[in-house]
Amino acid sequence: MTGFKPLSTPLLTEKNYFCNRYVLNRNDCMRKLKITELNRITAEEFKQAKKLPLVVVLDDIRSLHNIGSVFRTSDAFRIECIYLCGITAVPPHPEMHKTALGAEFTVDWKYVNNAVDAVDNLRKEGYIVYSIEQVEGSIMLDKLELDKTKKYAIVMGNEVKGVQQEVIDHSDGCIEIPQYGTKHSLNVSVTTGIVIWDLFKKLS
């Protein structure tokens, strides 16, 4: 995506170079970094930084911890905006803050009463909208191909009921995460993290 530059970590790059080039003592190469060494941008810089052309729509998410976790992940990968729909709580909230850790104040968000309206509005604005759900004809995440010139939105559904069928009907398609165990689903915040990371790699 033109103009988008992932956060740089020059300290890590330099350290990895010397570890590989001169085969330094393993303990020297594996020292935990201090927070002050991570070179993170400020909240003000985040607001001004180029964002990933990706919107996350939370459809009736009941857990404040899940919502906070999505905010934190969205901050990490500079997501454009989060749409909070239906019963999904909005910041500020102390329980949400426990997992968001301040990301609820850096990532842009808006409340929309109905997720169908949110999806329809996003599509009118030129976004390609995918619901993250197990449906007939879903696209497996590892097979998904994206166009870096386009904007995308993903819909995450309720912890029990998933994405509403009406929302699915208004989406451009559905993405499914391949799973190989005995369980049929993943926690919604975990799912969101997996999908955001995959789309970040494909759009950056």
Image: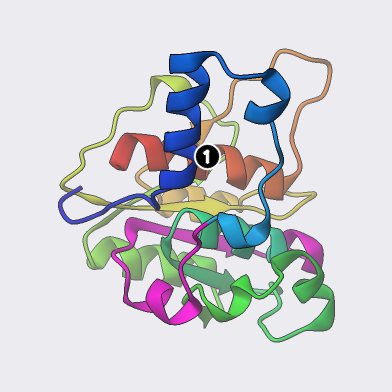
Query: Which secondary structure, mark 1?
Result: helix
- The C terminus sits in image quarter: top left
Is residue 160 toward the left or the right of residue 139 in the image? right
Q: Nearer the viewer, residue 18 or 106?
A: 18
Residue plotted at (25% across, 54% down): 4
Taking the spot 28% from the left edge, 35% from the top edge, the residue there is 146
Examine the rendered structure and indicate whether residue 193 appears above or below residue 109.
above
Q: Nearer the viewer, residue 173 or 109?
A: 109
Q: Nearer the viewer, residue 17 or 192?
A: 17
In percent of width and height, residue 79 lies at 43, 60
155 shown above or below 186: below
At 35% across and 49% down in the image, what residue appears?
A: 6
- Percent position (x, y) of residue 45? 39, 76
Name the side, left or right, on which 159 lies relative to 112: right
Of the residues shown, which amino acid type is indicated by label 1?
Val
Asked whether residue 63 appears in the rendered view, the answer is no
Tell me the quarter of the picture where residue 50 sits.
bottom left
5 shown above or below 182: below
Magenta stretch contains residue 45: yes
Q: What range of the chain is rendered magenta? A: 39-66
Categorize mark 1 by other alpha carbons within 10 Å: few (<14), some (14-19), many (20+).
some
Q: Is residue 87 left or right of residue 146?
A: right
* Circle 1 residue: 195
On the image, the x and y values in percent for residue 21 come to 43, 16
What colour scheme has been applied to the protein in the rendered image?
rainbow
Residue at the bottom extreme?
92
- Residue 119: x and y in percent read 41, 63
Residue 24, visible in the rendered structure:
yes
Residue found at x 59% / y 19%: 24
- Residue 22 forms part of the magenta stretch: no
